[in-house]
Structures are given as structure tokens and as C-alpha cells.
Image (cartoon, rainbow, N blue to C red):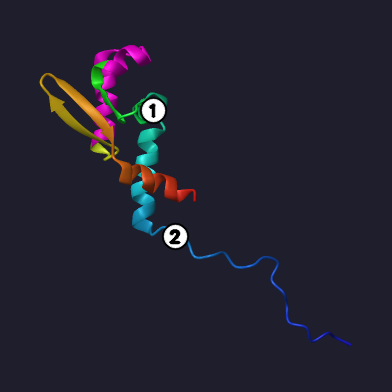
Amino acid sequence: MKSSKPAVPCCPPLLAGKLTPADVVQLAGLFRVLSEPARLQMLSLIAAQSNQEVCACELVESLGLSQPTVSHHLKVMYEAGLLEKERRGTWIYYRIMQDRLAALKEVFS
């Protein structure tokens, strides 16, 4: 005699994803920018400052990289929207865009 029990799926259905396809593309771009170790370290150094900003010149000595290399990495992060910048005389100060950082954190919460 056959059982008339309904088939039970092996796993519960996945919850609906939080990210839209457009979100995924945008966030993947940000993670790609941060996949460079020097950029990730720069972001960490900026975040660790009490005022969460740093002059580009301070990163050169801290990272042991040349000034053109540091400037290139800062430019890439700025263009990706991870940093904002402010010129003060001949110096440029960089700050983390908190909303972009929050978006990255949200992916994992």
C-alpha cells in the first residue's frame, strides 16, 4: 500500500534576497576597488583617525609607498565614491563616505 503523504522538500526555500541586480553590480565594483591590499589598508588608516580624515601626505610615510602610488589609490577610491576630498592650501584631505561604507557593511548583516 502506498503512502499518501505529500513529498517534503529537502530544504526550506531561500529567503528573498535583499539586493537588487543593480545593487549587486554597484557593490561588486566597490569590493573590487577594495580588493587591492594598499587601498584596504588606506581605508583602515583613515577610519582609525579620531576625525576620520587624513592628508594624502601622511599616507606616503605610513604605507611606505611612493607619493604617485598613494595618489593613484586615493583617486581610484575617490572615483568609486568611497572617499570625499577637501583641498586646504596645497594639501588634500580625504574622508570616508560613511553611507558607502554602511552599504558595504549592510551586505553582511
> Which residue bears the numbered disc 1?
48
Residue 50, image quadrant:
top left
Q: Amino acid at mark 1?
A: Ala
Q: Nearer the viewer, mark 1 or mark 2?
A: 1
Q: Is residue 4 above or below residue 41?
A: below
Span colored in magenta: 58-78
Q: Residue furthest left?
A: 89
Instruction: Please give the name of the residue rendered at 20% of the width and 32% of the height, measured from the top-left corner.
Output: 85
Name the spot of residue 14 as percent of width and height, x first.
Answer: 57, 64
Q: Is residue 7 above or below residue 75?
A: below
Would you say residue 75 sits in the magenta stretch?
A: yes
Q: CA distance from mark 1 to mark 2?
A: 29 Å
- The local secondary structure at tag 2 comes to loop
User: SS of the residue at dot 1?
Assistant: helix
The residue to which callout 2 is attached is 18
Q: Residue at x 36, y 42 (%)?
A: 101
